[in-house]
Amino acid sequence: MKEKILRKLFLGFIQIHILYHAKKEPIYGTWMMKELEEHGYKVSPGTLYPLLNRMEREGLLNKTEKKVDGRIIKFYTITDLGEEILKEATKKAGQLFHEVKGKERSLD
């Protein structure tokens, strides 16, 4: 039960993370899974690829396909809407972080 609740909560963080990297440079699924894993998120292809597709449908990401070593790789970059959402989400996450960390210190 705990894992399921945390997974739902972390999905928002993962989307912010995806937007952040897609703003810096084109990203692709395998690289993003490794990047997320470095930050403690265990995301399977069955979770990540539908998420990337949904973010594209919602207008947050643009997808381009390139042939690399005989395979088609889907690369994602951030859209203008994605940048607006990232900016607002970053602001809200920062405010929440400072509030929670401040209260955590006062509880010690």
Image: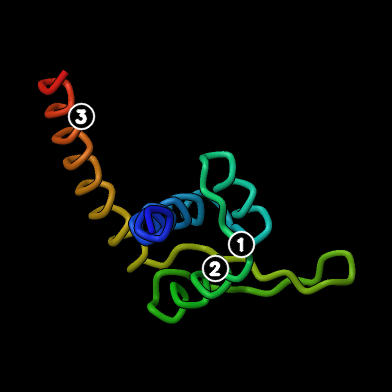
The answer to whether residue 67 is left or right of residue 100 is right
Mark earlier in primary sequence (3, 1)? 1
Question: Which label is found at residue 101?
Answer: 3
Q: CA distance from mark 3 to mark 1?
A: 30 Å
Placement of 1 over or under 64, stated as above or below: above
Q: Which of the colour schemes (rainbow, by chain, secondary structure, one colour) is used?
A: rainbow
- The spot of residue 71 in percent (x, y) is 83, 72
Q: Amino acid at mark 3?
A: Lys
Identified by mark 1, the residue type is Ser
Check the image and report above or below for 55 versus 108. Answer: below
Q: Give the residue number, with chain letter if any, for mark 1.
A: 44
Q: Is residue 77 above or below residue 16?
A: below
Q: Hey, what amino acid is under mark 2?
A: Thr
Q: Name the residue furthest bottom.
A: 57
Instruction: Identify which residue is drawn at 68% across, 58% down.
Output: 30
Q: Residues at badges 1 and 2 in contact (C-beta under 8 Å)?
A: yes
